[in-house]
Image (tube, coloured by chain):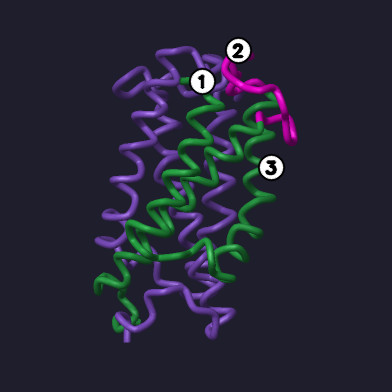
Chain colours: A green, B purple
Amino acid sequence: MSYTGLAFTAVAIAAVIDLFLLHTRLLMRKAFWTSYAIILPFQLLTNWWLTSRFIVSYNPNEIIGKRLAAAPLEDLLFGFSLILATLALWVALGQRGFGAKNSR
Amino acid sequence: MKHLGYVAMLVFTVFGSFWLELILRIGVLRQLKRLVLTIAPVALVFIAWDAYAISRHHWFFDPRQILGVHGPFHIPLEEYLFFIIVPIAAIMTLEAVRTRRPNWIIGDEQASK
């Protein structure tokens, strides 16, 4: 599968994990979208750093060619799926008693 | 210095997020077990993706701008660190939002009382 196909698939899988597998429903929560709004500029900045300097380069046959701050659109989806899957699992583990609030 | 190009991005991400641990006392690094259980499965999937992408030439790294240390599947060390550092930064951001907006529901509140 192309990077484009994989990137969209990853977002879909992360959404299914969040909404239906772990039932964390972060996609419905203000706290998640606020966090992502804070992360997004940093994501664009670091993606820009890696791609504009050609630290990472992409095979033009594997991306649709739409770019955001030098980085392929697919990178945004890659990062979003990584962050959503991570936070969903983090919260799910917290629900199962792995939080350490009592140790503060 | 050029070989530090990718590492510079990782260091920036660490500095950009880890101060939250000290200033807002979010206690993310203290929850080591939860952190490992969160990062490991997600990282495994993304490392598999990375390995596939590298083998299929979806993307490639400038050998002059990375340290030159490679782990399994020809994946540069920086990529492995990326899948540890970026998730921690995301978790720290969420936990920082929690401290500033304690009324916003995240979903794990009851269990942590």
Do the residues at discs 3 and 2 belong to one chain? yes
Residue B29 numbered tag: none
Instruction: Give the foreground label among 3 and 1.
Output: 1
Q: Give the chain letter at badge 2.
A: A
Give the amino acid type for the residue marked by disc 1 in the picture: Ser
Rate crowding at label 1 as few (under 14), some (14 to 19) or many (20 or more) other CA atoms within 10 Å: some
Q: Quadrant of residue B55?
A: top left
Q: Are marks 3 and 1 in contact (CB under 8 Å)?
A: no
SS at circle 1: loop
Mark 3 lies on residue? A45
Q: Amino acid at mark 3?
A: Leu
Q: Are marks 2 and 1 on the same chain?
A: yes
Q: Residue at x 32, y 19 (%)?
A: B73
Residue A19's place in the image compared with B73, above or below, is below
Q: Which residue is mark 2?
A: A61
Is disc 3 surrounded by few (<14), some (14 to 19) or many (20+) residues within 10 Å? Answer: some
**Residue A73 percent location from the top left of the image:** 66, 33
Q: Nearer the viewer, mark 3 or mark 2?
A: 2
Q: Residue at x 29, y 22 (%)?
A: B72
Label 1, on which residue? A2
Give the extent of the magenta segment: A54-72
Decide: marks 2, 1 in contact (CB < 8 A)?
yes
Residue drawn at (47%, 53%) of the image: A84
Q: Earlier along the polypeptide chain: callout 3 or callout 2?
A: 3
- The amino acid type found where label 2 is placed reads Asn
Instruction: Name the foreground residue: A93 vs B35.
Output: A93
The image quarter containing residue A19 is bottom left
Number of marks in picture = 3
